[in-house]
């Protein structure tokens, strides 16, 4: 019966996703007109707001008026308004109905609270949940068969808290919150794991694997950032014996952190499964390097979704070790706390089509320092990089999101883009300007050259020395000998010089110091995620710490360097 319900749900979700693709095809054919309409509608609906009156929305009749009259903004321009909205005030920055607020993780700076209008919430629901299934439907159709029943391993941890003006959660939580009653039909984890009580201390890697591994029919993998999934599979690699023993006995291990009432509940519900435990042991004993483990333990897993491009591409390559090279991935799209802005329209696509219905977009060529005469989508050129300035559907106007995207082509009138890096994540000591995306490639090349697998890495531009120099902090999967460690400084410097042509001349001239590599203790990145979790960050939103850009991060990571 579950398979029938799963099949119905998969077919219905896929149909909705395909419908969204059809709508995007229509919107993209008149994207330029939709952008003009978007500006006029926002000005008309919000001219009576406090922000609208302050910035003369009533005088805006065109895009040209909008760019001339309404100033560029940053989060500081909205911070006070948003918290007043959370306390129940209306008509401050938008007249659209708002029942939810989203929050950033705090991993890239001060935690932000952002209103989410009903319009923006619906777009998020459609394109972060239905559209990926629609892509999977089209992928299966090319193989001549319908999408099978979908029940998968989800890494999401979805929480929310109530305020007078609505509820607060992270953007990625919202689709799952809206579908909470249906969770048992498409996720292997129980509701208590996917929707933990606020403040609950739980070993999520173990719990999600504990409920997913017994299910041989698991059919997809779902995550927000693929770093979470890769980290979970590394945990599985190190703890498979415990997991198999617990599946065999039908218990939750006593060493696992979780509320005692939940432990008692599931120790009563779980049943011993020695057959599945032994099946898993046979595959785990073969090792993780001869062939990918996921197709061996879950033969019905045929696709997955999760953000894995831009600065996450380094981790996407690491994930392939577990899932294999052939498994198609839906890369979710280009999204931020402030808006869902672009989506792929097929699996394995690294190009995202911008959503002309979910905001107005302006662009500054990255080689131009002026914010005068910003471009719109009709002015963009393929192959060029731009800083994107966002007007969303929830009350942020001409907002400097500080993201840099690259235009890779066009889908009718809509630009296709890839995310490159954040402006505040460029490392620069002496004018070389190395982006986090470039560091991903540099470190991937270093990993290949030294034949070592990395759990994670961070870059510290050390300006305390004269001259300043780059320090790479890396957590390796296996211990490294002192003899090999001694070769790392030179190897990293070689990769950095190859990755950025400005570096070698600066080192030779003495303007930039020689590179240094330090090795982090095992578990450092898990420890940092735990610090953020205890601070209240939603782990679905936590991005890898690529560039150490403040004293707090520096103190944490340098305190975890191997002695």
Image (spheres, grey):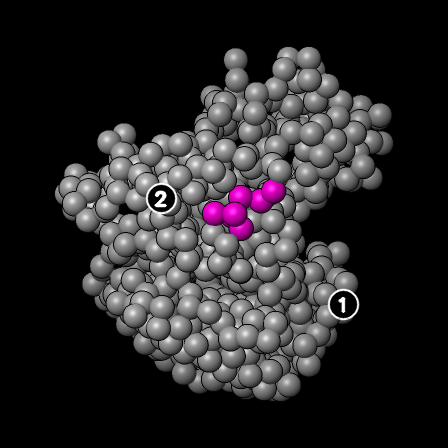
Mark 2 burial class by Cα count in 10 Å: few <14, some 14-19, many 20+: few
Taking depth in this image into account, of 162 and 96 the one nearest to the observer is 162
- Residue where numbered disc 1 is placed: 382
Query: Residue 367 at what x, y percent from top left?
Result: 75, 56
Would residue 523 be visible to someone looking at this image?
A: yes
Residue furthest out toward the front: 275
Could you tell me which secondary element the residue under label 1 belongs to?
loop
Give the magenta-colored segment's residue range.
291-297
Point out residue 151 in the picture as x, y percentages from the top left corner.
39, 61
Foreground pick, 151 / 245: 245
The disc placed on residue 69 is none
Return the x and y of residue 15 as percentages of the image width and height: 46, 80
What x and y, as percent, mark residue 401?
Answer: 54, 58
In the rendered image, which residue does mark 2 sit on?
275
Residue at image location 43% in from the left, 43% down from the top = 279
Q: Residue at x 41, y 58 (%)?
A: 217
Above or below, 547 relative to 492: below
Tell me, yes or no, whether the highlighted magenta stretch contains residue 292.
Answer: yes
């Amino acid at each position: 019966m579950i398979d029938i319900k799963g099949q119905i749900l998969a077919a219905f979700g896929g149909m909705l996703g395909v419908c969204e693709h059809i709508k995007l095809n229509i919107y993209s054919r008149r994207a330029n007109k939709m952008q003009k309409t978007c500006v006029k509608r926002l000005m008309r609906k919000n001219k009576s707001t406090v922000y609208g009156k302050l910035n003369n929305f009533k005088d805006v009749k065109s895009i040209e008026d909008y760019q001339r009259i309404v100033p560029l903004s940053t989060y500081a321009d909205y911070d006070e308004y948003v918290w007043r909205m959370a306390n129940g005030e209306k008509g401050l920055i938008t007249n659209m109905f708002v029942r939810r607020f989203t929050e950033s993780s705090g991993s890239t700076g001060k935690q932000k609270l952002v209103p989410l209008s009903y319009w923006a919430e619906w777009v998020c629901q459609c394109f972060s949940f239905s559209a990926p299934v629609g892509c999977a439907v089209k992928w299966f159709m090319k193989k001549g068969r319908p999408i099978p029943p979908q029940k998968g391993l989800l890494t999401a941890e979805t929480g929310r808290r109530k305020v007078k003006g609505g509820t607060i959660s992270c953007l990625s939580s919202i689709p799952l919150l809206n579908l909470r009653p249906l969770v048992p039909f498409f996720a292997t984890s129980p509701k208590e794991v996917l929707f933990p009580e606020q403040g609950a201390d739980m070993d999520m890697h173990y719990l999600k694997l504990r409920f997913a591994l017994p299910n041989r029919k698991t059919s997809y993998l779902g995550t927000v950032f693929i770093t979470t999934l890769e980290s979970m599979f590394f945990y599985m690699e190190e703890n498979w014996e415990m997991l198999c023993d617990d599946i065999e006995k039908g218990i939750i291990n006593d060493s696992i952190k979780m509320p005692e009432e939940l432990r008692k509940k599931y120790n009563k519900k779980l049943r011993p499964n020695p057959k599945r435990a032994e099946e898993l042991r046979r595959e785990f004993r073969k090792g993780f390097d001869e062939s990918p483990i996921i197709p061996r333990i879950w033969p019905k897993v045929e696709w997955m979704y999760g953000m894995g491009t831009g600065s996450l591409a380094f981790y996407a390559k690491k994930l392939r070790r577990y899932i294999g090279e052939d498994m198609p991935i839906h890369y979710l799209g280009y999204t931020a706390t402030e808006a869902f802005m672009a989506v792929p329209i097929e699996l394995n696509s690294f190009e995202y089509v911008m959503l002309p219905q979910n905001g107005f977009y302006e662009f500054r060529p990255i080689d131009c320092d002026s914010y005068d005469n910003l471009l719109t989508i009709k002015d963009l050129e393929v192959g060029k990089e731009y800083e994107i300035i966002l007007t969303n559907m929830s009350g942020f106007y001409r907002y400097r999101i500080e993201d840099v995207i690259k235009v890779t082509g066009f889908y009718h009138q809509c630009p296709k883009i890839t995310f490159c890096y954040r402006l505040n994540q460029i490392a620069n000591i002496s004018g070389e300007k190395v982006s986090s995306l470039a560091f991903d490639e540099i470190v991937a090349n270093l990993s290949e050259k030294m034949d070592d697998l990395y759990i994670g890495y961070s870059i510290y531009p050390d300006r305390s020395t004269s001259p300043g120099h780059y320090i790479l902090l890396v957590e390796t999967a296996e211990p490294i000998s002192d003899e090999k460690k001694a070769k790392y400084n030179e190897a990293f410097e070689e990769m950095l010089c190859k990755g950025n042509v400005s570096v070698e001349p600066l080192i030779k001239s003495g303007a930039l110091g020689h590179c240094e590599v330090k090795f982090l203790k095992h578990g450092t990145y898990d420890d940092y995620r735990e610090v953020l979790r205890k601070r209240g960050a939603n782990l679905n939103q936590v991005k890898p710490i690529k560039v150490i850009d403040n004293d707090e991060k520096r103190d944490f990571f340098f305190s975890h360097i191997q002695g």
